[in-house]
Image (tube, rainbow, N blue to C red):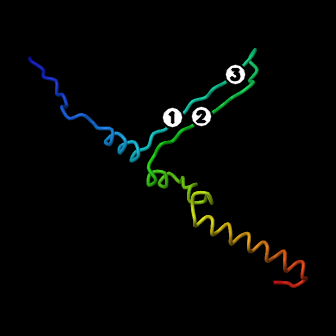
Amino acid sequence: MVETIAKSTAGATLADVLSLVLDKGIVIAGDIQIKIADVDLLTIKIRLLIAGVDKAKEMGIDWWEKDSFLSSKAQDEEREKKIGELEKKVEKLEGKPR
């Protein structure tokens, strides 16, 4: 019986690999521990997640939308919050209830 091995002649391009990684996501995790005589001196936990925006949102990760450095919507919300706090302070100083 002669067996043939199927071989793909079409190689994956970098764009294909990147598209797959962003679509599915990839997690890289590692820990570094420094011990002397079974006493933990330092533990560093490293976690790296690479995913596209849609996949990240699907997993419940959306910190960039709440970071005022990255999002103008977050900047506006932060500004409104500060204005509200200042108005309360002014009313308190003037002795007027809101």
Task: Report the residue at 62% width, 60% height from top.
Answer: 68
Coordinates of residue 83 in the picture (x, y in percent) = 73, 73
Which residue lies under the disc numbered 1?
Answer: 28
Task: Report the residue at 37% width, 42% height from top.
Answer: 18
Nearest the viewer among 26 and 82 is 82
Q: CA distance from mark 2 to mark 3?
A: 14 Å
**Does residue 65 appear left or right of residue 94 in this picture?**
left
On the rendered image, what quadrant is the N terminus found in?
top left
- Give the SS element for disc 1: strand
Q: CA distance from mark 3 to mark 1?
A: 20 Å
- The image shows residue 82, relative to residue 1, as above or below, that is below
**Does residue 90 appear left or right of residue 12 in this picture?**
right
Nearest the viewer among 14 and 32 is 14
Nearest the viewer among 11 and 59 is 11
Which residue lies under the disc numbered 2?
Answer: 46
Q: Earlier in the sequence, mark 3 or mark 1?
A: 1
Q: CA distance from mark 1 to mark 2?
A: 8 Å
Coordinates of residue 24 in the picture (x, y in percent) = 40, 45
Q: Earlier in the sequence, mark 1 or mark 2?
A: 1
**Does residue 93 appear left or right of residue 57 in this picture?**
right
The answer to the question of whether label 1 and label 2 lie on touching residues, with beta carbons closer than 8 A, is yes
Which residue lies under the disc numbered 3?
Answer: 34
In the rendered structure, which amino acid carries the disc numbered 1? Ile
Q: Which mark is residue 3?
A: none
